[in-house]
Amino acid sequence: MPGSRRKFLSVTATLGLVALTQIAYAPQAAAQMAAPKQQFLALATSSVGGTWYPLGGAMAGLIGKKYPQLKINVEASGGTVDNLKLMKNNKVELAYSTADQAFAAFRGEGKFDSKIDNIRGLVGGHAIIWQLVTLKDRGVKSIQDLKGKRVSLGAAGSIGNSIGQLVIEAHGLKMNQDWKPEYIGHAQGAGALRDGQVDAVLNISSVPTGNMTDITSTQGADAIFLMPDPKVLDKLIADRPYWVRAKITGGAYKGHDKDIPGSFAVSTILIADKSLPDEAAYAIVKTLLENNAELTKAHNLGKEWTTEQATNGIKGVIPFHPGAEKYLKEKGLL
C-alpha cells in the first residue's frame, strides 16, 4: 500500500504540473496574432517620378508575396500633405508621410486647418537628412561663419526653405540681415556653388543625393559639410520630437570616406488608417522588418527600413497602430 500510494501521489503531482504548465502557456498561445483576412488596400505614395512611388511598389510586392491575401494598390499622389488629406477623407488605408507633417496633421497645425486624428503609425524608415555644403576656398568652417554669405535653401517652397532659416537663425544669424537666402533648385545648386553665385548649398534629402554627388565628384574633400552646433541641435531636437539625430554615411560621397556625424533628419514613416485590422497592420510590419534583404534588393532605400529605425518618426509623434505596436513590443522594439 505505501508503495502504491507513493506512485499515486507521484502521478497526481506530475499531472498537476502538466496542467499548470498548460495554463501558464495558454495566454501566450491565445495572444498570437491571427493571419489577416483577404482585403484590398490603397497605398498613397508620391508622384510617379518621386522616391516613394517605386518604394511603395517594392513594399507592396513583398507584402503580397508573403501574404497573398493582402492586395495593395500603389497610388501616385502629391506627396506628404496630399497623402494625409487622402487618409483623412478615407480614400486610402496606407500612406507615406514625413514625421513632421504627420505631427502637424494629428494636431491640426501648420498646413492642416483641422486635426487628422485617424492616422496611426506602422513603421519608420529612411530619413531625409540635413546636408549643407560649402567649399574650402570660401573660408567657412561652421554655420556661424555664414555671416555675410549667400546660402541656397533649394527651390522656393521646398522643405529646406523653412528648416534652413530655422537652423541658421538658431545660431544667431538673422536671415536677410546676417546672411542672404537664395532659392535655387537642387539641380542647379552645384553649379551655383562652383561658380560663386552662392557660398553654401542646402539639401534636405536622402543620402546620397544628386546635387551633393555632383559637388563632391569634382571637389572631393574640398567640399565641407556644415553641421549644427551640438548644443544648438540639442535644443532644436528637444522641441521637435519628429527630428532624429543622423549622420552622412562614409563613402556616400567622393572624398568623404568616414561617417560625418552631427546631422539630423526627418523620418519617412508608413502610416495607416486606424480602421485597418490589427492582423493586417501586424503582418505588414512583420514582413518589412523580417525581410530587409529582399526589400533592399527591390529598392535601395529598403536598407534603411530596419529594426533600428522602426520607431523613428512615430514614437512621441503620433500613436502607433495597435497591430504594429503588438509586433514591435514582441520584438523588444517598444
Image (tube, rainbow, N blue to C red):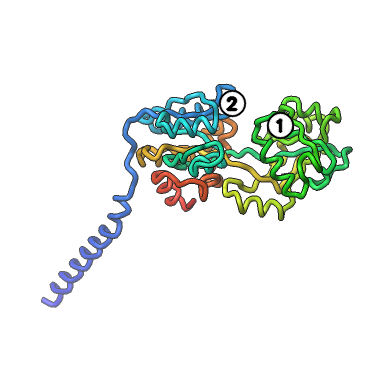
Q: Where does the image place residue 200, in percent across and percent down from the top left?
A: 79, 36
- The residue shown at (35%, 39%) is 277
Q: Where does the image place residue 276, in percent across and percent down from the top left?
A: 37, 37
Q: Is residue 159 left or right of residue 290?
A: right
Q: Where does the image place residue 99, in percent across and percent down from the top left?
A: 55, 41
- The residue shown at (42%, 40%) is 118
Q: Is residue 251 above or below residue 69?
A: below
* Residue type, numbered disc 1: Gly
- Mark 1 falls on what kind of element? loop
Q: Is residue 33 left or right of residue 244?
A: left
Residue 154, labelled with which disc?
1
Q: Is residue 177 left or right of residue 273?
A: right
Q: Is residue 216 above or below residue 232?
A: above
* Residue type, numbered disc 2: Gly
- The residue shown at (49%, 44%) is 107
**Viewer-closest of 185 and 280:** 185
| 1 or 2: mark nearer the eye | 1
- Mark 2 falls on what kind of element? loop
Question: How would you rate the neighbour count of disc 1 (Cα within 10 Å): few for under 14, some for 14-19, many for 20 or more?
Answer: many
Residue bearing mark 2: 50
Query: Hey, which quadrant is residue 165 in on the image?
Result: top right
- The residue shown at (70%, 40%) is 164
Dot 1 or dot 2: first in sequence order is: 2
